[in-house]
Every structure is written in C-alpha cells, then in structure tokens.
Image: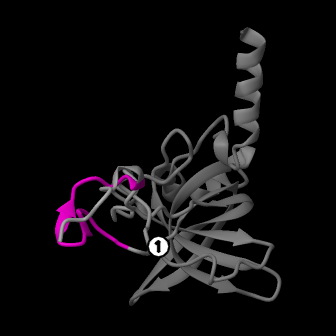
Amino acid sequence: MRPHLLLICLLLNACSNLPLAIKNPPQFDISYSQAVQKISNYKDAPVRWGGLIINVENEQNFSLVQVLYYPLDSGGKPQTDQPNEGRFIIKSPEFLDPAVYTVNTKITVAGTLAGDLERTIGKKVMRLPLISATAIHLWPVYVYDNRYDGFGYGYGYNPYYGGYPYYWGSYYWPSASPFMRPAFRPR
C-alpha cells in the first residue's frame, strides 16, 4: 500500500504547475514593509511577492509590471481579502503581453530586489520597489456558474434548457434525470 501512496503523491506533485521559486518562499523572506523602509539594505535580496496587476509597460528589451501588493498565503497566492500595503514593479527581460497580463489579475513573482523606480501616481511622485523577476505566475480566474445543467449537477450549461424545474408538455416534471422521464404525457 505504501509504494502506491508514494507513487500517487509523486504524480500529484508532478501535476503542480507552480514554479519552485513561487511554491517555496526564500529562506529569509523580506516583507514589503521592511523593504520600503530601507530598500538599500535589502538590495539583491531574494523575495516572493504578489498582488493585483495595475499596469504593464513594454520597453524595447524588457517589460515593467506595476502591481498592487497583497500578502501571500502559504501556497504563494495573493490574499486580496487582506489590506494592501502599496505598490511595487516587476522587471522582466521577456515581453509580457498586456492582453495576457491584464489589469486586476492575481500575480506572484519570485526574484531579487534590484532597487527602486520613481513613478508618478496621480499627482504624487513615489519611489516603488523594483523586483528583477526570475519566475512569474499568473493565477487563473475561476468563474462560478450557478446555472443548472439538467443532469443533477448544480453547475455547467445545458444548451436546451438553462433552469429548473423542467417543463414537459403541460406540467412541470421535478426530475432532472433523462432516465426518469414519464412514459407518457397527459394531454
């Protein structure tokens, strides 16, 4: 039994699509508030931060992504139900398509603190921490669909009918199973 359990665990771990740098935090994880207070003390320190994308700027040889910082949970996903602490910028040597890296998408980055950049937000000039990215992960957006699909499940889509109860002829039939249809319809 134990070899099978080990095999299952290995297979499930192999199915994980998170990069190791995102999945595992650095040994000495520097918080956003520590870095903002004295960024020069933490230059070239490894960090794993995340939040919501605000803006994407593509230059000739790199891309800059401005992110609204949120604390991360144990799996590295931004907790947007917590208060945000500020903004930071991700610098990636790759082209990051603004159609993929859209506004309000959850993102987690692993990299090193490379200093800070000056940005104007509204009419205020701010210095934002700059992270040189080694790994970036966009979190998928899950949309809950509460339409009744007609086969006993509370999700999905039935192109023939989108709700419950079903209407069969001149009365409502309470069953959603195709096997429990009446043999005859009263007229």
The quadrant in which the N terminus is found is: top right
The answer to which of 21 and 168 lies nearer the viewer is 168
| Number of numbered discs visible in the structure rendering | 1
Q: Nearer the viewer, residue 187 or 77?
A: 187
Counting other residues with Cα less than 10 Å from the Cα at mark 1, is it few (<14), some (14-19), or many (20 or more)?
A: few
**Where does the image place residue 34, in percent across and percent down from the top left?**
50, 49
- Write down the region rendered in magenta: 161-178
Q: In the figure, residue 165 lies in which quadrant?
A: bottom left
On whether residue 39 falls in the magenta region, the answer is no
Q: Nearer the viewer, residue 54 or 86?
A: 54
Please name the amino acid that badge 1 sits on: Asn
Name the quadrant containing residue 11. top right
The x, y position of residue 132, in whole percent, is 72, 63
Residue drawn 72% across the image and 79% down it: 63
Q: Height in image: 119 above or below 36?
A: below
Q: Position of residue 73 (x, y in %)?
A: 48, 43
Q: Main secondary structure of the magenta part?
A: loop
Q: In which quadrant will I find the C terminus?
A: bottom left
Residue 171 among magenta residues: yes
Q: Secondary structure at mark 1?
A: loop
User: Which residue is denoted by mark 1 in the rendering?
Assistant: 104
**Which color scheme does this rendered protein use?**
one colour
Q: Is residue 37 above or below residue 52?
A: above
Q: Which residue: 72% across, 26% down? A: 8
Between 26 and 12, the one nearer to me in the picture:
12
Residue 4 screen position, x and y as percent: 75, 17
